[in-house]
Structure formats: C-alpha cells, structure tokens
Amino acid sequence: MQTPQTRYAKSDDVRIAYQVAGQGALDLVFVPGFMSNLDIHWEDPGYAHLLRRLSAFTRVIQFDKRGTGLSDRVDTHHLPSLETRMDDVRAVMDAAGSGRAVLLGASEGVPMSILFAATYPERTRALVLYGGYAHFHSWVLRPAVLAEFIKRADSEWGTGASLASFAPGLVEDARFAAWWARFERLSASPAAAVALARMNAEIDVRPVLGSIRVPTLVLHRSDDARVKIAGGRYLAEHIKGARLVEMPGRDHPIWTGEVDRVVDEIEEFLTGVRPVPVHDRVLATILVARLSAPQPSVIRLGERQWTERLEEFRSEALGEIARFGGQAIASGADDIGARFDGPARAVRCALAIQTTAENSGLKFAAGVHAGEVEIHDGATAGPAVHVAGRISARAQSGEVLVSGVVKDLVAGSGLQFTPRGTETIDGFDTPLALLTVVDERSPAPGAHPGRTELEMLSAREREVLALVAEGLSNAAIAKRLRLSDHTIKRHVANILMKLDLPNRAAAAAMVGRAG
C-alpha cells in the first residue's frame, strides 16, 4: 500500500492533517497518542502493518492533532484543551465524509475518544480504547515522575531517549531506535513535547465514563510500561457493558508487539467474526498505478468535480483489473494496486488503465513487478508489493514502467520494451533494470500462448508441464520425478506465470492444442 494522500480539514482557523485508507463498510477514526506524524507512520513496518490490517475491513481515517505532525503548529504556551481537540476530530470526520464512525483511541487518544463519544453519541458507532486511562496521575505518571520526564524531554527530545519510557523492549533495536528519534523530531518540537506532557497531566475524564452509551472494547497489555493495567481495568469497570481484553506484553505503542492480536480483537468486536490466520506465499505479478501531478488537476477542475472524476476512474480501473483476471489489493487515495497470476495480463491491464485515465483527463503512472508475495487473510504483502510501488514512483506521467523480471517473463507476448535505467532496491544484489512498455498486438484478455512459447520453459518445466497435462497432481508428479512437493509447486507456479495462464486446466488445454 502506498502512503495515502494527506489532506487538511479546517477546525476554527487551524488546519488538521488527515489521511484515509481502505474501503471497508465501517469508518474507523484512529485517535493517536502522545506523538504522531502521518507520513512517518508508514515508514515503520509495524505501524504500516497495523494500518494495512485495519484498512482491510474498515475505512481508516487517521489524523495529526493540532500542534503535532503535519497539522498546523500552535502556541506552546496555550495548547488546546481536550474539548478543542475533540472538535478537531469532528472537523476531520466532516472533511472525510464520515457521518458516524468507530473511534480507536490509543494512549492519550483514549480520553479524547471517551469525551467525543459522550458528547456526540449520534456520531460514534463504537469505542475501541487501547492502552488508555481516565486520569493521568493515577495510571500513567505521578507528579514527581512526570517532572523528571519533562526535565529529560526539555534537553533530550529528538534523540530518541523517550523510547525507554514507551517501549523498553525495543531500546536495543537499532533500526527502531533511529526511527523513534526521527518520530520524536517530526511529531513535535521540544517545547511542544514539554507542553503536551504538562497538558496530559491535567487529563481526568472519570466523571464522563458513566455517560458512555456505545459498545466499548478495552484493550490493554498486562505489563504496559507506560500506562498501568489498572487504568484499563478502571475503564472497563466504569463504562457500562464494556469488554476488557488483557494481552501479554510490555511495550506500550499499539503498533509494537503482537499487532495481529490487537487487530484480531478489534475485527471480531466490530464485525462479529474473528479472522482465521491464513498465510500463503505465492509467485505473483503486482501492479501499482498512481495518480501523478494531482494538485494541478484539483486546481483546474475544482475539488468536487475532481473527486467525482477520480471516483469514476477508480471504478473503471477496478473493472479493468477484474477483466484481466486480477485481484485488487489495498490502496490509498491516489493509487490502485492489484495482484495477477500472469505478468502479461498485469502489463496489459496497466496499459488499459492508462487509456482509461487519459479518457478521463487524469494523469497516471504505473509500475509492474513479479515476485513472491504473502497472502494473509486476503491481504497481499511482501517485497514484490514494495518493489512495484517503488517502480510506480519512478514512472513518469502516462508511462507503464516494468522491472526486468517482468520483461524476461513475457517474452513472445507481443509487448515491446525500452530501457529506462535501473533502480537500487534493498534485497537485490544488483540494481533492478527498468523498462517502459508498449503493446503492439493488444490481444484480448485470456488469450493463450502458442507452441513456440513452450521454448520459454526450462527442460524440467516442460517435463512437469507434460505431467500436468496428463492430469497428475503435484504430489504424484513429485513422486514420479523424485522431487519434493514444494519444488513441484514452484515449478507449476513458474510455468503458469511464464505462459500467462490462470490455472493448471488452462496449461493442460494449451499442451493439447500445441500437440
């Protein structure tokens, strides 16, 4: 998933930055804790995984509180109250077109979510309260400990020193520690961090708890290093009908530790169905098409006409993905992703989407890459998705850019390529070749390869294909050739990808036609 476009909602005279991801039936407003920065969230694998999981079954609306992250800065001597921040939530919901939403409050975001639900029950579908509290000094930091935290923050903010207070289990993780230091710097200035700590110390929403009348789930880690478990238990005891789930763990941030356990509980609470873990690694071709130069188009068309045209285009693009046998994957506001079994179909789908974009007066660029992905509960992840996104970002407006891996797999398909340099990507020993593509033949989707394309297969792959055509299962082929089931599975996957075929039956039929 590419980083969603950051937009701004106006609350009084302050602009509040927000992003929307996912297309679920339920809106979920993620109310962050002490620190946040919408762009930095996506840079940490754990945070990105949390957002991807949530966006698989909800429409996630996340925002930066005023004075933090990408939102407008405010006077650190007069930071806003919870009531003002609550109004910011309402402004973001209005801007995102959300009439009623689930509020997911994390840490400091819990009391704000509680106050919002009590004040605007008609706009609150449910509450999910993670690692939260109703009174700061009772369950977070006593006054003397808070004074020491503020003293350290005043001199060490931006170095990552606060990590030990929030996630002691990750202090020795060099990558996470470096990210956390950057997270501090880009979330709030040192003065704002100190002011926020002082403001948090004044939080007390205990009198409000009895007014909550929406379904409530309380999640808390039993050894939470920042907020005592007693804080979560108090919430569950004083909010009528609230359900408490205590989970093992010490690190406080919601995106650390067993993120899947947290999201599983949320999904079951909101949908009534607990997800069944399903992991499968397969070879696939990933297409990522992104909007290029969006701002000039918005200015030229106007916000409303732009939104209508973009939604119409997205609908048509999803139709093209289905027509070419692809499956849409999670995408952001300005990009569309899809997974295909065959590389040629993915490339032709990208070309079709480009034509659709041109007809709609929009400018899109696309990237295509083939590799191994992991499918978990219907969500697609893995290095190939990341690489396709990188290639898409490199592509120019109106261009379909593919990796050398894709070019090698579609030999003989009628697609023509022009070299466009290389891209250095982590995990590849050498820079990845990039090529632009044009389709000279434009065959119909699902067209099958001819006899000469069997030459693309290795001798072993042709041997496996012949046995597939005989109707043998993978296990029977493995036994016949004295190979492992896993090896045969990979051979079959490679055969289908190289020949651009959807399944084993199509492979057997192709062998029959080729004689």
Image (cartoon, rainbow, N blue to C red):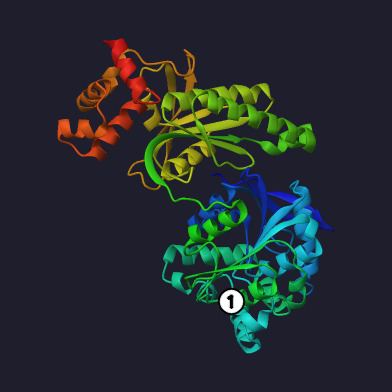
Determine whether 26 is above or below 219 in the image. above
Determine whether 437 is above or below 198 in the image. above
What amino acid type is highlighted by mark number 1?
A: Val
Residue 485 appears in the figure: yes
Q: Residue at x 55, y 51 (%)?
A: 273
**Quadrant in which the N terminus is drawn:** top right
Q: In this view, does 214 lie to the left or right of 148?
A: right
Determine whether 363 is above or below 274 in the image. above
In the image, farthest residue toward the right: 12
In the image, farthest residue toward the bottom: 144
Determine whether 381 is above or below 223 in the image. above
For the residue labelled by badge 1, is the local secondary structure a helix, a strand or a loop? loop
Q: Percent from the top left, x then y, of residue 41?
A: 57, 57
Residue 150 appears in the figure: no
How many numbered marks appear? 1
CA neighbours of label 1 inside 10 A, class few (<14), some (14 to 19), many (20+): many
Q: Is residue 371 left or right of residue 140?
A: left
Q: Which residue is drawn at 60% across and 65% down?
A: 185
Q: Percent from the top left, x then y, of residue 487?
A: 24, 37
Q: Percent from the top left, x then y, of residue 360?
A: 68, 24
Q: Percent from the top left, x then y, of residue 84?
A: 80, 66
Q: Is residue 371 left or right of residue 197?
A: left
Looking at the rendering, which quadrant does residue 468 occupy? Answer: top left
Q: Residue at x 60, y 54 (%)?
A: 39
Q: Which residue is drawn at 72% across and 67% down?
A: 114
Where is mark 1, residue-wise? 227
Looking at this view, is 66 or 213 the one in front? Answer: 213
**Quadrant in which the C terminus is drawn:** top left
Q: In this view, does 119 lie to the left or right of 472?
A: right
Looking at this view, is 427 or 94 the one in front? Answer: 94
Looking at the rendering, which quadrant does residue 231 occupy? Answer: bottom right
